[in-house]
Structures are given as C-alpha cells and as structure tokens.
Image (spheres, helix red, strand yellow):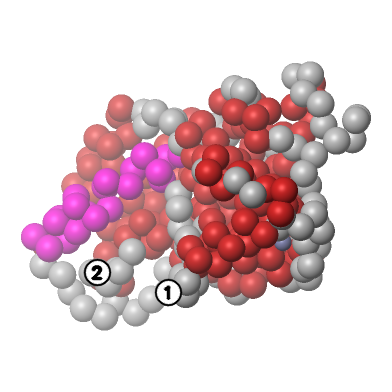
Amino acid sequence: MENNLEGSGERKLQCSDVSKCFQLLESILDGANIPDSQEILKSKLAKCQPCFEHYHLEQAIKEVLKNKCTKHEVPSELVANIRQKIEEIK
Amino acid sequence: MSEVQRKKYTEQEKNRIFDEEFMPHIDSMYNFGYRLTFDEDDAKDLVQDTYLKAYRFINSFEQGTNAKAWLFRILKNSFINDYRKKSKQPAKVDYQEVETYYNSEDVDYKMTSDLRVDSLKDMLGDEISNALNSLAVDFRTVIILCDLEGFTYEEMAKILDIPIGTVRSRLHRARNLLKDKLRSYAQNMGYKTDEEE
Ligand SMILES: [Zn+2]
C-alpha cells in the first residue's frame, strides 16, 4: 500500500463530494459488488487526500477488529451439549 | 421461524447438513452470542437454542444458500425475542428506541482524520474489544456482522430484517462511534490527535 504514496503531492486536499466518495469507499472495502471497483478505488486514492486517508483508516480499523475481536474460545462442553440435546429431540 | 416447511430431508440428509453446514460456524456463533450478552453462560444458552431451532426447522433451510447467515438470523431473533425479555439486566438503550432514533438513512459523511492508523496498530486487543463492546447493541451488531464475520450488506439486511440503506447508514454511524472511542484511547496513550495540535 505504501506504493500509493508516490505522487501524494498531486492529491487534492479537498474532497469534492465527501458523502458520495466515503460511502463508495466503504462499500468497496466491505466487498460490495461494484463494477470496476478496483479501478475506481485506485484512481480515487491517487487523486484525493481525504479519500486516501479515510480509506486507510477504515481499512486499518476493520483489520484490527477482525484480528482482535474474534478469538473467543468456544467452551469445550458446548458442542457435546448441543449434540446431546439434538439426540433427545430426534 | 414462520417459514413453511417446504420439503422433507431424510434423517441422513439432516445429519449431513447439520454436521457439514451448521456446526462449522460454532466459533462465529459463540463469538456473536458472547458479544451480544457479555456472559459466557448466556452465550452458551443462546448458541445452543439456535442450534436446536436450526435442527427443528432444518426443512426450511435451502441447501446451497448461506447457512452461516441463516444461523446468525436465528441467533439474533432468539436474542431479541427470548434473551432480551427474560434478561435481568435490560440493556442501557432500548432496542426499539435505537431503531426509531437511528433508522434515518440521512447520514453525515465527514472527515475524521484526527485518528491515526499508527495509533491503532499499537492498541491492545482489550482496547479494541472494549470500544466495540461499549456500543449500543444495534451498532455493535452491524460491526460484528460486517467487520468480524464478513457478511455482505445484502446478507446483513436479511439477518437483521432491515433495508440495505439502513444497513449502510447504521454501519457508518457505528463506525463513527467506534472511532470516537478509539480516539479517546489514542489520546490516553499519548498519541497526538489533530484536536490537540
Ligand atoms: Zn475524495
């Protein structure tokens, strides 16, 4: 991602439509099915500093959430309990 | 669970679906249950109830559709209909209240560049987890579904029984609230934010 930094001096500092841009960026980040999303993303990030910063912040938060908030160990007896109950209602 | 029981699977098919399509999601289901209730026993009950319902209503599950989304929808409904009613500690914010308050799709997208990516990287798991847990249940739920579990907006709309536009706007609000929390943690950790500069 650091490669995107090249030419950062050319990025405009004001986003022309923050609402529309950020919504689109978040949709792409969330894997929405948008035609040509990778091209759109590339050009937005290359041209607009607010878009660039927003995208990278959202991406970092998403990653950190996924890595730090999904490691709850399932209590060992839970699966056995479920299977036992299922046998009872069969 | 009001779906009509369209077709009957054989016992063998039922067991196969249950073992191969339902059980592999138990980690995600337990994590969801735990993040809704903050209690190990309640989470276990919720997950167990969900799997029993899933088995009982297995004929309304269409093979080839997303089993994980189907299970999450059952768990979320059990949480609202069963758990929330008998819960001794009602949540701080009433579900319905949040619904009407925040369902507007008119959301402000604004700059929040005062939280830095590098400050996030240094945060401990507990800080991230606490920030997520501090959100009202509706906001917490969309972040869990989207960011932790990778559901699409369409799947989230089905799981939550809300329009896609509402999914989108609720998610955006949730993320803003989460960023507020993370920003205050970052400040406590001594990171400069734009507000102080
Ligand atoms: Zn922009």
Q: Residue at x 80, y 39 (%)?
A: B114
What's drawn in magenta, residue-wise? B12-31
Circle 2 packing at 10 Å, graded few (<14), some (14-19), many (20+), is few
Is residue B15 something one can see in this rendering? Answer: yes
Residue B168 appears in the rendering? no
- Chain letter belonging to callout 2: B
The kind of secondary structure element at disc 2 is: loop
Give x and y (percent) for residue A78.
32, 34
Assess whether residue B29 is covered by the magenta stretch: yes
Residue beneath the point at 63% across and 24% down? B123
Label 1 crowd (10 A; few <14 / some 14-19 / many >=20): few
- Tell us which disc is closer to us: 1 or 2: 2
Give x and y (percent) for residue B146: 52, 54
**Is there CB contact under 8 Å for labels 1 and 2?**
no
Question: Residue at image x 23%, y 42%?
Answer: A83
Residue indicated by mark 2: B64
At x 30%, y 29%, the residue is A77
Kindly identify the amino acid type of the residue bearing the numbered disc 1: Ser
Q: Position of residue B31 (x, y in %)?
A: 46, 39
**Residue A10 is one of the magenta-drawn residues:** no
Which one is earlier in the sequence, the residue at label 1 or at label 2? 1
Which of these two is toward me, B187 or B10? B187
Q: Horizontally, is B63 left or right of B153 in the view?
A: left
Q: Position of residue B188 (x, y in %)?
A: 79, 21
What residue sits right under mark 1 in the picture?
B2
State how far apart marks 1 and 2 are (Cα).
20 Å
Q: Is mark 1 within 8 Å of ligand 1?
A: no
